[in-house]
Amino acid sequence: MKGYIPDIKVEEIKNRVSIVDLVSEYVTLKKTGRNFVGLCPFHQEKTPSFTVTPDRQMFYCFGCGEGGGVFTFLMKISQMTYPEAVRHLAKKTGVVIPERVSPKERQEAGYREQLVRINEMAAGHYIKNLHSPAGKETVAYLRQRGIREETIKAFRLGFALNDWRGLRDFFEKEKLSLANAEKAGLLVAGKEGQTYDRFRSRLMFPIEDLSGRIIAFGGRIIGAGEPKYLNSPESDVYVKGRNLYGLNRAREAIRRQGCVVVVEGYFDLMALWNAGITHVVATLGTALTKEQTALIGRYTQDVVALFDPDEAGQKALARSLELFLAGNLNARALVLPEGLDPDDYVRAHGGGRLLELMEGAPSMVDYYIDHVLGDQGGFEKDRDSLRRAVAFIKPIENAIERNLFIKRVSEKLGIDQELLKKEISPALKAFPGAGATGGGRGNEIDRLELDLIHLLLSHPEKIARVARTKGLDHFINPELKHLGETLERAVAGVQPLDAVELVSGLKPGPIREGLMIKLMTEHPPEEEKILDRLMDDVLRQIRRRWYKEKHKVLKMDILRAQEAGDADRCNRLLVEKERLLREEKVLANRYH
C-alpha cells in the first residue's frame, strides 16, 4: 500500500519527525556523544545496545539486529502497517495526506483504523451516558470510592446503559459497520443474525495502546450481577498479553521515577493515581505475561509488584516474580499489611505511606524464599521444593545473579550448594539461551562489495556513475548485486531513496546487519574528490578480484583439459584467457 501515499508527503513527514523524540516516547534514552542509547524494546537485555542516531534518522540494536527509520520503528513497536505508521506520523506532524485509493482498497487498508474508530466512538457514547441522568448511580459509586473528576476525565471513564441495543442503535445512527463493531468485541451475535451490546449496566474503562488509541474496554458491573468484571475479547487491534492498562499515561512518570508499580486492577491503579502515584500500570484480567514484562523493560528495570493479599493475588505475585527474573528486571514484592488491597490501603493511609512501604519492600529473591519456598520443611524432606526452586532458578541467565540466588536458597533452607548446583546444571543445558556467548550471526560476506553499496546508500548521486562503469557486473555476491541493481533502478526512475528504510526491509542476515552497522557508525567523506577516489579504489579492487577468480578457474579448467588430452577445449580456454586479459587491461586503463 506504500504507493498510495505520495512520495513527497512521505518525505515531508520524515523531515518533520525527530527519531529521537519518537523513540523517546517508548524507550528511555541517554545521550552518548552524537548518539542516544537505551535498552532495546525488541529483546530483553540489561546492558543498553539500542542506539539512535539523529544524523541518520535511524535506530539499530547491536544486540538483536533490529533497525530502521521512523516508519519501521513505529511499525515494529505498535504492530502497525506501513500506511498506518505514515498516517499516524502525518497526524502528529500536521501533514495532510490526500486519499487516492479505491473504496475496496480503502476498506482493506483501513480495517484496523476502523476498529479503533469504532472503539473511540463507543468511548464517547459511554462518556455521554455517564454524565446523563442514567449515570448518576455510577458517578455516585465513583465518588464513594474516592475517584476524583480529573481522574475520571483523564482515563475517559464511561457508562454502558442497562440496554441490550443502546450501543448498537448508536452505531446504526452514526452509520458505523455493525460487523466491525462485532469484530471489535462491542457487539455480540445473537439468534437469527441479530446483534446486541456486550457491555450493559457497567462502568467502562477504555484500554489504550501506547499511541493513546482506544483498542478495547473493561467493564465493572454496577449493582448485582456476574461476572463482576467483563473485558473485551481479543481482536485485530487488541491482544491482552501485549498491553498494560495505563501505560500510555504512566510512561513519563515511570521514566522520572526510574521505577514502575504493577497492580492487578483498574481501581487499584485509579486509587494510586488519585494519591499522586502515577508511575503505575495494571494487568488486564490475566496473569502477567512475558510480553508485558518486556514492555515494562522498555521504560525501566525496577519494578514494585503490588498485588492483592488474598490467595489468588499471592499466586499471581509468585508467577509474576518468575517472569520479572527471566526478563532481567529488578523486582520488589510488596504485600500490604492488615489484609488491605492497594485501593483500600491508599484511601486509609495515603500515598506517602504507601511510597514508604514500596521503598522498604523486599527483593523478589527474599520474597520468593520467605513466602514461596520458606514453609516447605526443607529440601531434604521435600523433593518437590527442590524441583520448584530449580524451575525458578533456571531462567536466570546472569551467572552472578544465579549463583547469588543459589547461595541464598541453600542458606535459607539448609541444603548443600553443590547439590543444588548439580540439580540446576542439566536444566541450564536444556534451557534455550543459557550460557549463550552472543557470537556472530550469519556467514562472512564480501567486504569490498558491502563497502561500495554503503557508499552508494550514503551518496545516491554516485549511483549513476557506477552504473555507467558497469561496476555491478563484477560483483560476486548475488544478494549485494541485486541490491545494487535496485539502487540503479530507483535512480533511473527518479524515485526518492531512503537508505535506512531500504536496508531495514532486507531479509535478516549478515548483509542487512553489516549495512545497518555501517549506516550507523561510518560516515563516508563528503568532499567529492576524496569520495570519487575512494569509490574508484573500491571498484578497482572489486574488478581485480573478479578477474583474479576468473583466471584461477580458467587455469584449473585448462589443466583438466590438458590432463584429459582434449586439445580443442584447451585451445578454446586459452583463447578465453587471452580475451579476459585484454578486457582487464582495457578496463584498468579506462578507469585508472
Image (cartoon, rainbow, N blue to C red):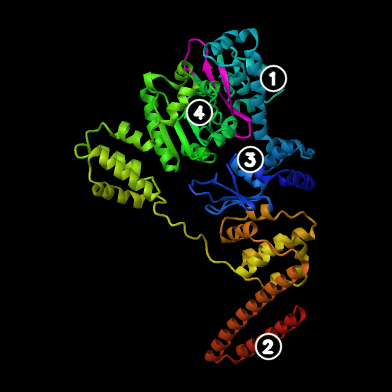
Q: Which residue is mark 1?
A: 172
Q: Is residue 315 above or below residue 171?
A: below
- Would you say 187 lies left or right of 87 here? left
The mark that comes first in sequence, 4 or 3, is 3
Q: Which residue is mark 3?
A: 80
The mark that comes first in sequence, 3 or 1, is 3
At label 2, which amino acid type do we have?
Answer: Glu
Q: CA distance from mark 3 to mark 1?
A: 28 Å
Q: Does 220 lie within the magenta span?
A: yes
Q: Could you tell me residue 569's position as x and y percent?
A: 61, 88
When asked about the image quadrant of residue 415, the answer is top left
**Element carrying mark 1:** helix
Q: CA distance from mark 2 to mark 3?
A: 57 Å
Q: Which mark is residue 284?
A: 4
Q: CA distance from mark 1 to mark 2?
A: 81 Å
At label 3, which amino acid type do we have?
Answer: Met
Query: Viewer-nearest of labels 3 and 1?
Result: 3
Residue, x 29% and y 40% (percent of image)? 409
Q: Is residue 164 above or below residue 530?
A: above
Q: Nearer the viewer, residue 300 or 463?
A: 300
The answer to whether residue 441 is seen in the rendering is yes
The mark that comes first in sequence, 2 or 3, is 3
Q: Which range of residues does the magenta coloring cover? A: 203-228
At label 4, which amino acid type do we have?
Answer: Leu
Q: Quadrant of the C terminus?
A: bottom right
Q: Which residue is mark 2?
A: 578
- Would you say 170 lies left or right of 261 here? right
